[in-house]
Amino acid sequence: MVWTLQEAKHKFSTVVDAALTGTPQGVSRRGKTAIVVLSDADYQRLVEQAVESREQFADHLLTFPVPEIEHAQATPRDVDF
C-alpha cells in the first residue's frame, strides 16, 4: 500500500504494524512514492543478500569490456636549446 505523507503521519502506528507483519509500506510525497517503511528483519535480509551478491571491485574492473583503442601517431618535433 502507498500512503500519502499526511495519512502516514496520522496513522504511523498502522504503517509500522503493517511493515512489521511483512508488508512494506510506501509513503508518497507530491504524488510520487518517496520512501518505503519495512521491518528491520526485511532490511537486514536485503543487506545480507546485497553483500553476498557483491563482487570484489578488482574483479569487476577485470571483467569490464575494453574496446581496442587506436593510439595517435605523433612524430616528435625538433627542439632547439
Image: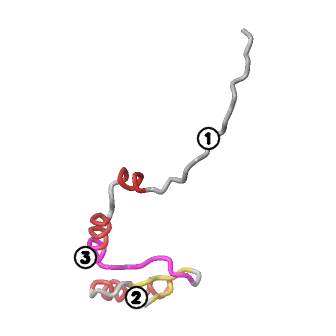
Q: Return the residue nearer the eye: 57 or 51.
A: 57
Looking at the image, is 55 positioned above or below residue 30?
above
Quarter holding residue 51: bottom left
What residue appears at the point 73 percent right and 22 percent down from the top-left corner?
Answer: 77
Dot 1 corresponds to which residue?
71
In the rendered image, residue 9 lying in the magenta stretch gets the answer: no
Q: Callout 2: helix, strand or loop?
A: loop
Residue 81 falls in which quadrant of the image? Answer: top right
Q: Residues within 10 Å of mark 1 (few under 14, many from 20)?
A: few
31 up-or-down from 57: above or below: below
* Residue 66, percent from left and from top: 50, 53
Q: In front: mark 2 or mark 1?
A: 1
Residue marked by disc 2: 11
Q: Distance between the residues labelled 2 and 3?
A: 22 Å
Left or right: 77 as drawn, with respect to 53:
right
Residue 12 placement: quadrant:
bottom left
The residue to which callout 3 is attached is: 41
* Of the pair 50 and 64, the residue shown nearer to us: 64
